[in-house]
Image: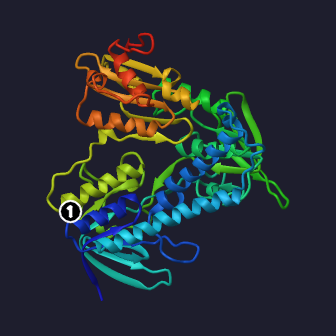
Amino acid sequence: MTKEYDVVVIGSGPAGYVAAIRCAQLGFNTACVEKWLNKDNKTVYGGTCLNIGCIPSKALLDSSHKFIEAQKHFSAHGISVGKVAMDVPAMISRKDTVVDQLTSGIKGLFTANKVAGIAGTAKVVGNNKVVVTDSDGSKEELAAKHIIIAAGSVPIDIPPTPIDQDTIVDSTGALEFQEVPKRLGVIGAGVIGLELGSVWARLGSKVTVLEALDDFLPVVDRQIAKEAIKILSKQGLNIKMGSRVTGSKLGKGTKKTITVEYTDRDGEQKETFDKLIVAVGRRPFTESLLDESVGVELDEGGFIKVDDQCATNIPSIFAIGDVVRGPMLAHKAMEEGVMVAERLADKKTQVNYDLVPSVIYTHPEIAWVGQNEEELKSKGIECNIGVFPFLANGRALAANDTEGMVKLIADAKTDRILGCHIIGASAADLLQQMVIAMEFSASAEDIGLTMFSHPALSEAVHEAALAANGHAIHIGNRKRRS
């Protein structure tokens, strides 16, 4: 018997569960299909982000940051704690508890909003039809006026280092180590590689990061990227740019090692690790998701083609989150979920893709929004640039956390803020002020004339805005023209 719904959402990650809840709030009879099973073979919601991505990685980042603070930095505050040790299984267990709490919360939200949670693997077999296959192989047919695909993404594998989730792991396996590897290799100096490398470096691993590209964090403003690699290298990450992995060989014995072969400017190299994390990016999960007869168009990368409102070429089918163009970010996915739900209800909601904030949760954090200096130069746009270091910020000094800076870029003619780039403590939270300001087309002068509480880290944003117009108070004039 076919079950009928107004909306069927495929996937319960940030894109899917938000879309399903908002659709239900708007009066649509909504179902959300999820195939994810936990260790007890029970369906869990939240997708990659809550189960094996954003949330668990931040739990480990926070635990490891507290460890390194106690080990190396408490003494600056006059705090003596003696010998500090990390119980890795306890840290992993805490991470699992956080994950369980949040995934259970989504189940509760589905119940509260009358979203039907359906367990199984979904396949779109018609413009208005989805077949769900349960873990035991039984099939169920769902009919829907609208289908929203939010199937997410999976890690990219590379042939030279086949994943075994033991010695060679992806980002999922890197969240489950039960002891600190003495020698840890990381392939990829992107967001995932730097975050996971930071976790284990803080706990004592000798970490080597191999990155095929010559430029470190090419999507980040160059001034911020240079500061980031300097700080992260000082923290113990041995980042080797221009290192292309060509092969690997597993060692023998009860405790296997992995020898990685790579080439750099000096030729062929080898390095042996106890564990290897492959973090070279993610790809959309669209295999076996769409029957060819439906005719949903994909691009050459396997992404589902959509317009600015996330509509596919089939009027009844939408796609959101990691399966479509744009950065693979949970917050971008959530906003797309809301947008599609409200569009189905004939509302005019639109995502502003020019102002998607990005964050790398190392310490210090790296966060940015808008355009960077290099992009604006390439477009021939003249800009005023204000930079303010946290070393000159009273709250940062009081907290003994002064690494980094705020960089604000404003149009030289209109003074409108075009970009903000931060490396420093709480950069993600500080950046959000500028996302809001830029959403309302604020100028650097607007921020400069706004009263900020004192003492606060956010005063660095205020001073950077003042500096963009040559009015910085607490440091020499840092205005410059680009």
Q: Where is residue 277 in the image (x, y as percent from the top left)?
A: 65, 50
Dot 1 crowding, Cα within 10 Å, few <14, some 14–19, many 20+: few
451 or 112: which is nearer to us?
451
- Does 346 sit left or right of 337 as displayed? left
User: Which image quarter holds the C terminus?
Assistant: top left
375 or 358: which is nearer to us?
358
Q: Position of residue 231 (x, y in %)?
A: 61, 29
- Does 316 sit left or right of 359 as displayed? left
User: Which image quarter holds the N terminus?
Assistant: bottom left
Q: Where is residue 18 in the image (x, y as percent from the top left)?
A: 33, 61
Q: Is the residue 340 above or below the residue 460 in the image?
A: below
All told, the count of numbered labels is: 1
Q: How is the image coloured?
A: rainbow
Type of the residue with mark 1: Pro
- Which residue is painted at 37% across and 39% down in the image? 432
- Does 461 sit left or right of 350 as displayed? right
Task: Identify the residue under disc 1.
Answer: 315
- Which residue is painted at 55% across and 56% down in the image? 56
Q: Is the residue 227 above or below the residue 139 in the image?
A: above
- Which residue is painted at 72% across and 51% down in the image? 86
- In this orientation, does residue 342 appear? yes
Q: Where is residue 475 in the image (x, y as percent from the top left)?
A: 45, 14
Q: What element carries label 1?
A: loop
Which quadrant of the view contains residue 172?
Answer: bottom right
View extreme (front): residue: 78
- In this orientation, does residue 163 appear? no
